[in-house]
Image (spheres, helix red, strand yellow):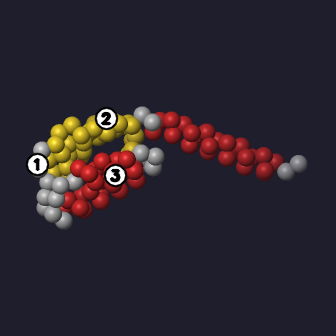
Amino acid sequence: MDNSASHSSDALLGEDAENADRGARSVDFELAVTEATADQVVIAVRGEIDLATAGRFREVIDEAIVPGGRLVVDLSGTRFIDSTGLGVLAKAHARLAASSGVVIVR
């Protein structure tokens, strides 16, 4: 019997279990607009920003961007942010900077 096939399926199960666990943790994700004025929007994020939640994060940020305005992203309740989430913040910064707006991360 070839043990390599057995080992590769064990590795796959381990990866599936890890991905399932990350998916369960991603459910613990909340976004809220806590302040909205003519020139400033504050968004509070709680939980984890990763591949599973970055789409929703992007949607809320895109809706909150006001050219020339100020976008405050409160990550004090965020436990984890991956490169996908950082990319969302970088794109928001580029969009606002083009119109003399700012993104503030706290």
Q: Position of residue 45 (x, y in %)?
A: 31, 39
Provide the secondary structure element on which disc 1 rests: loop
* Mark 2–mark 3 distance (CA, rounded to whole Å): 17 Å
- Pointer 1 or 3: first along the chain: 1
* Mark 1–mark 3 distance (CA, rounded to whole Å): 20 Å
Label 3 environment density (alpha carbons within 10 Å; few <14, some 14–19, many ≥20) = some
- Pointer 2 or 3: first along the chain: 3
Q: Residue furthest left?
A: 38
Q: Position of residue 33 (x, y in %)?
A: 24, 40
Label 2 environment density (alpha carbons within 10 Å; few <14, some 14–19, many ≥20) = few
Q: Position of residue 79 (x, y in %)?
A: 37, 37
Q: Say what amino acid the circle numbered 1 marks.
A: Ala
Q: Residue 29, located in which quarter of the rendered image? A: top left
Q: Read off the residue under disc 2.
A: 77
Which residue is found at the position 13% from the left and 58% from the top?
A: 68
In the visual, does 71 lie left or right of 58?
left
Quadrant location, the C terminus: top left
Q: Say what amino acid the circle numbered 2 marks.
A: Gly
In the visual, does 22 lie left or right of 44?
right
* Mark 1–mark 2 distance (CA, rounded to whole Å): 25 Å
Q: Read off the residue under disc 1.
A: 38
Q: Read off the residue under disc 3.
A: 58
Indicate which label's residue lies in the foreground, 2 or 3. Answer: 3
Which residue is found at the position 40% from the left and 53% from the top?
A: 84
